[in-house]
Amino acid sequence: MALTLNLNGNTHEVDAEPGTPLLWVIRDELKLTGTKFGCGVASCGACTVHLNGEPVRSCQTFIEDIEDAEITTIEAVGDDKIGAAIQQAWVELDVVQCGYCQSGQVMSAVGLLSENPKPSVQEIDEYMSGNACRCATYQRIRAGIQRASEILEA
Amino acid sequence: MTINTSRRGFLKSAAAAAAVLLVGTRPDGALAAASSETAQFNPFVKIDADGTVTAIVKHFEKGQGPATGLPTLIAEEIGLTMDQIEYEFAPSDPNVYNNLLFGPFQGTGGSTAMANSWMQYRQAGAAAREMLINAAAQSWGVDASAITIEDGIVKAGDKSAPIAEFVAAASQLEAPAEPRLKDPSEFRLIGNETVRRKDSAIKGNGQAMYAMDVHLTNQMIAMIKRPESKGGIALGFDDSASKEVKGFLSAAVLPNQAGVAVYAENTWAAIQAREALEVEWDMSGAETRDSDQIKAEIMAALDAAPTYNVNKADVAAVSAAIEGADKVIEKTFYFPLLAHAPMEPLNCTIEQTADGDIVLHDGAQMPTGPHMAYQQIFQLPPEKIHIKTMLAGGSFGRRATPDADYQVEAALAFVVTDRARPVKLVWTREDDIRSGYYRPAFGHKVRVGLDTQGRILGWQHQVAGQSIMKGTAFEAFAVHDGVDHSSIEGIADSPYNIPGIALGLTDTPKATSVLWWRSVGHTHTAYTMETMMDLVAEAAGLDPVEFRLAHLSDTSNPDQQRKAAVLKLAAEKADWGKALEGRSQGVAVHKSFGSYAAEVVEVSGDPENGIKIEKVTCAVDCGIAVNPDVVRAQMEGGIGYGIGHVMRDQITLTGGAVDQFNFPDYEPLRIGDIAAIDVHIVPSAEAPTGVGEPGTPPSAPALANAINALSGVHVAQLPMEENGISFT
């Protein structure tokens, strides 16, 4: 089916079969490779993108359900001040190790601070529990979110 | 504009236009330099005419930090800031970019990246500095001893210029045979807490390129349909349902019949077409056993006389000492199969150039492995094969198979095509969990006898499990007198002074494909040793820290002193013995890969309603900590990796088939599982040792000891959640 995707402020004409996960349209058709494939079953969060500002797992988001939605990926999330603050904090604290899950971590962290500018540790742990990091960078993710919250408050 | 027509001026400007200073070593290890990128010379340092300095990194980056650490060594010795140095991954060349601890073999493993590069990269940087200084000395007519380089600026008295000024002239000089290395008192970057990772920004904004992100023009995606159980043989297939999938191209039985390759225009089509493919299998030679049978074989081996008397102990005397002891503590341990499950599912891309060369794009942990395998498969000389190392989304050992498994699989999927289109082999998470290589299952049985004073009289230790090294290219390196050292490392060779230790080993039959897993044998030996030390201390009525220190008391033995020092530091920083109301602490200390790590885990709750891991305090001695914050991160990650798996993970087999599929049934550590980790680094003047793995071994036994201290439940069969412990 032909459809129009509103992604990162641009429109893209895409031809894909119904049932195709958004993840593969982003990665294979649009060649935006910052959004990662980790599990395919919405269990790791590496594929997280924003749909109308809300984090979703793009491996379980199907193209027939998203026409008209505004999609934001890791490549553009830094254009927004919350995304920029998270990315700044990630660099200040060297959150990453292998880095493969971090696009998804950043997208979820932006989602958290968008709805809760000053989350508690418990709120961070609950919100971020669906984003796995096999390198176990979790305590820096926690610290990074707190640091970004400070940056935004300043 | 003045046109310089003198011959000298022409030569100088010609050199400047093309000038690149390359510094590295020749295959014989001697320092060497060259002036042009076309030279037949593979360097460690490249300085372009504009002064851009690039470190050529021979180890792959899976998060453990060599893309920061090796540039740090070069920047330190030249006299640069970290912003003035870039990095590139080295090409595959086992003569120049070999791991100095592996022989003529390029690869990363055993936490050796910094340990083996430490002098080599500093020497290359120091040689580049001397050449730049000598070039400046000639140009300025100043004695070289009066010239310094700091922050990329060459200075002598009132003269100063960026290094770019001297690249052309320096590139015409011979490399010094023995350049002066900086004294540690002169270090500005090595050991500097403020040095940041070189790869942070690109990994936080989506720009980092992993092998999974390779999109070559006209590439096909290949996925392999594999048998349910290892050892099944593909006889044929029916792809009529696959043909219904838009984007499906074709399918072909792999030349080794280990599976059927499905080719498609994109990844989603490949996933669906593979799902739809019907394959006829010959399962007569496939694995059929259950993991319960494998466990039973291991347990039976522990009750029989071991095949190998590893430390040539007088077993009869040790047995007699234990029989006559005042108290005997006996425990049997079981460690299940474990998957590595790196975040990036395995993949690589292979293409053939117009010249008939083969290029592999891969997060290559051991480039020499696929390089050698490809010479056979493609019948090409080594110089016709090229490996482009990409960032790797984790490994934990999985990418370092001695048989180059997934790179060979990609090559087989490529050779059955006409090679006109590049082939990108992609594994899904299910492939990773179900078709992988595993930490072998192991069992330990330990009997310790104590006298009336609580002193150890004898320590009889039996180990049984499947050898990782036997039958691989690494057998000669790791197996001696029949003993695979990776099965028993960290027991009899531990720095502890344990009187009357008798260590026996029995190899159990091949159960499945096994492989080193972050910290290898230490994953089970440290757990056994360190939980036994606690049980023995408890029986002796002694504090676990004091009891351990009593077995590390030889002041003339630096190995014992370093182990004791991390233990004391971790205990001090954790406020050992002063846990808050309702909490308990557990400690473990272990040496692995040349480094010493002690960890104190503090828990609350109870096994039935849920144990909460409140805090982990770690002290590490890894020699000079080149990038202290990277060291700290590796300890944090190593702790999480060790604890996450003992909490809840195992791979089990039913009729030879893996029971688990994906993360929902091989659940990773999550952010809420460990509330805090606090890492302390012991200052050291010793040469750097490993950090990628040493954080892992003490973490699980420290958790087990904390749970035992809290509840009296000692978990010796893993994972914990299958053996009476729940977590919150």
Image (cartoon, rainbow, N blue to C red):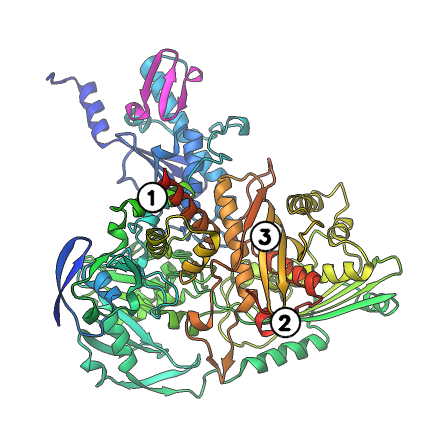
Compared across the picture, whether B619 is left or right of B435 comes to right
Image quadrant in which the N terminus of chain B is located: top left
Q: Position of residue B158 (x, y in %)?
A: 36, 11
Looking at the image, tell me whether mark 2 or mark 3 is earlier in sequence order.
3
Instruction: Kindly identify which numbered label has been placed on residue A32.
Output: none
Which residue position is annotated with label 1?
A85
Q: Quadrant of residue B144?
A: top left
Q: Position of residue B248 (x, y in %)?
A: 20, 75
Comparing marks 1 and 2, which lies closer to the viewer?
1
Front residue (pair A104, B200) = A104
Image quadrant in which the C terminus of chain B is located: bottom right
Q: Quadrant of residue B430?
A: bottom left
Residue sitting at 46 percent across and 41 percent down?
Answer: B29
State how many labels appear.
3
Which residue position is annotated with label 3?
B616
Front residue (pair B603, B275) = B603
Mark 1 lies on a secondary structure that is helix
Using a 10 Å C-alpha cutoff, classify the residue at mark 2 as few (fewer than 14 neighbours), some (14 to 19) or many (20 or more).
some
State the separation of the CA atoms marked 1 and 2.
45 Å
Residue sitting at 41 percent across and 72 percent down?
Answer: B662
Which residue position is annotated with label 2?
B717
The part of the chain drawn in magenta is B144-166
Mark 2 lies on a secondary structure that is loop
Circles 3 and 1 on the same subunit: no
